[in-house]
Amino acid sequence: MDYKIKDIKLAEQGRKQIEWAEMHMPALMSVRKELKERQSLKGVRISAVLHVTKETAALVRTLKEAGAEVALAGSNPLSTQDDVAAALVEDGIKVFAWKGESEEDYYSNIKEILKYEPNIVMDDGGDLHAYIHEKCQSLKIIGGTEETTTGVIRLKAMEESKVLKYPVIAVNNAFTKYLFDNRIGTGQSAIDGILRATNILIAGKVAVVIGYGWVGRGIATRLRGMGARVIVVEASPLRALEAVMDGFDVMPMSKAAEVGEIFVTATGNINVISKEHILKMKNGAVLANAGHFNVEIDVKGLKEIAKSVRNIRPYLDEYELPNGNKVYLLADGRLVNLAAAEGHPSEVMDLSFSNQALSVEYIYNNRDKLEIKVYNVPQEIDEKVALLKLKGMGIEIEQLTEEQKEYMKQWKYGT
Ligand code: ADE
């Protein structure tokens, strides 16, 4: 069977969701029109590990219209939208994903999509790339893309240790990706996840954001915008200084743990909320993770010290601590925006996925020229995506005159 999903009968609802997403993705719809006309991916087999959302459906349908055959697995055991998965199967996409799959299912789904012997692979987080390098070295892969910061860090490590086997475009590193998806997208969707799981008031709360990369600063800014008193915890002196000058309180986690009421992790690192931190927290503290993997909060440690655990409502579990305090863990420490909500809004994914589609085409067109390394998205693609988005928003921008273009090339003009 060419798919494994929750329930094919959900397809009609999934189709409506995809339609709603596509209506808000004008840049990707322009890219689709172009790729379809060019049939630039005719006969190309693509296997992708991406969060199976209505926005990913818009991307996958674009690749298909360009002539590709696509197999898709989920990028997180909790992020698949089952109705969307069903609609994609009806569209002829080979989908292996469902919400609530086990870690074992997660990897067996990756194995399934690799049986189609892809020419190009797309990943979000680096698990697919790592799996291929460890277990499927015989596959003849032209190249791949990577959607997220965590995955790019892993790929750079593979490049550095000279084990990388094919060229990869770091979609994450496009200006039109990280500045909007990581910052503005997560800024909204992580709070969306926290609110859907808890329905608590943000205003007046002490919120602690751990990590001040693009994701952390998006969340910190939006929490402040909703009236929270925001503390930033950051290990990099440069980023910590930025956070201070952006007007946030900055302190180490050992201090923030004592005063915070809502904690959000966004570091890409392990155990940034440890059980020692949890034992210092106030009664009622809410813990959420916005990073790619479920390693940022020491969930295992929390489970070890807890006297009791109760599920309160979807994606909200109460842990009673030995000191009698209760803390509330969202989505079992998995990425809160995709587990407890629907991920970033379509308007943001419009940018990320236009970069993805054009990067896949670029890899295929340049398959004989690319070296085995991690590439950034070519600047022409990045600028094109920005222009398409602006056009979709009905915004015209300034054009330089010939005199101005010439001036920018000169070094002799001074005072
Ligand atoms: N990552 C974050 N939000 C997403 C979404 N809506 N679809 C796919 N991947 C995502």
Image (spheres, grey):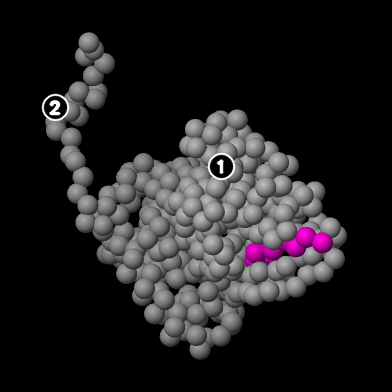
In percent of width and height, residue 247 lies at 50, 37
Image quadrant containing the C terminus: top left
Image point 82% across, 69% down: which residue? Answer: 308
In percent of width and height, residue 395 lies at 22, 52
Image quadrant containing the N terminus: bottom right
User: Is 305 rendered above or below residue 242?
Assistant: below
Give the Cα distance between marks 2 and 1. 41 Å
Q: Is residue 326 magenta?
A: yes
Q: Earlier in the sequence, mark 2 or mark 1?
A: 1
User: Is 244 rendered above or below residue 396?
Assistant: above
Image point 59% across, 42% down: which residue? Answer: 232
Relative to 390, is 80 on the left or the right?
A: right
Would residue 273 be seen by someone viewing this image from the given angle? yes
Read off the magenta span. Answer: 324-332
Residue type of the residue flagged with mark 2: Glu
Label number found at residue 212: 1
Label number found at residue 371: none
Residue denoted by label 2: 403
